[in-house]
Image (spheres, rainbow, N blue to C red):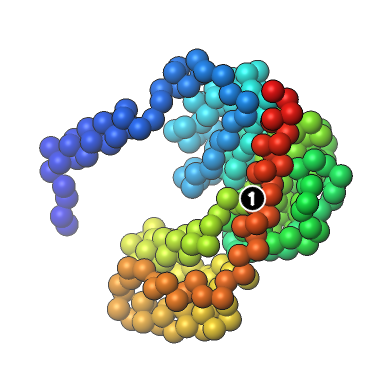
Amino acid sequence: MFTQPLWMLSLVVIIQKQYIDQHYNAIKDFMSRDYDGLIISGANPSQADMTQESFWEPLIEVMEWAEQNTNSILCSCLATHALMKAKFNINRTLRKAKSWGVFPHRILHPDHPLMENITDGFNGPHSHYYDISIEEIEETNLKILAVNDRAGFFLLATQESDLILFQGHPEYDDKSLLKEYEREIKNYLSGQRSDYPEVPENYFSNLTVSRLDEEKKNILDNKEFNSFDSSALEDIDLGWIETGNTLYKNWLSLLSKRK
């Protein structure tokens, strides 16, 4: 089996460090500045126990700092699950099947400022293996603003919006779920997952789903895959993008009122 020489691996690490030093701020520099709000994005989970993730301690350090030094924290996906664990001691649970695709949502608190100009039944993307118990959420000061009974909650927030927690992905563009699907196919071919991935629900057109099923047969026969062509994105309903833009506009409006 081919393995890279040690000097090559060391070079990769050096290049990665140089890139990080050039394009990212150190936490101490980040914390020396003033912010109206902070967005903490997610990541692919690599550990069943989040506290064993390599980024756990610095992530919680930033969260605790932000609670005292910003007007609002907006978390996405894994960061949402991490904050629920760190602040409320609520553990995420592994779902029987991944919540993956585009789903309609019921708005439970239409009078909340974040829900302004958002239509009940709006579609939104999900992509998560884990979930948070609705019953445990209801014991906190968080409001469940939007939910799908199968996919899970889309958005939680306090009444004051000092904490905003997305489990859904309003930031996804038209290609996001396609790229995830391609990644999971490659993970299957490389042995990182045991099964060929299901197609994300309610995302591709019916015609594209049929074509992808044919592509699956070719991929399984040839054991090779790079990417799908742009036709896979034809006839996708992108209504969630406008909803996502509105949600972020509502958040920015709340921040501007607190300046």
Q: How many marks?
A: 1
Q: Quadrant of the N terminus?
A: bottom left
In the rendered image, the vertical position of residue 26 relative to residue 156, given as above or below: above
Is disc 1 placed on a helix, strand or loop? helix
User: Residue 219: image x %, image y %?
Assistant: 36, 77
Q: Residue at the location (36% across, 68% down)? A: 227
The part of the image, by quadrant, that contains residue 240 is: bottom right
Q: Image check: 221 left or right of 144? A: left
The amino acid marked with disc number 1 is Asn
Q: Residue at the location (78% across, 51% down)? A: 117
Q: Which residue is mark 1?
A: 245
User: Residue 161: image x %, image y %?
Assistant: 75, 33
Tell me if residue 91 can be seen.
no
Return the residue nearer the eye: 239 or 126.
Answer: 239
The part of the image, by quadrant, that contains residue 184 is: bottom left
Q: Residue at the location (76% across, 43% down)? A: 114
Q: Image check: 83 left or right of 107? A: left
Return the residue nearer the eye: 104 or 234.
Answer: 234
In the rendered image, the vertical position of residue 191 relative to residue 83, given as above or below: below
In the rendered image, the vertical position of residue 213 relative to residue 80, given as above or below: below
Q: Image check: 110 left or right of 79? A: right
Q: Image check: 164 left or right of 180? A: right
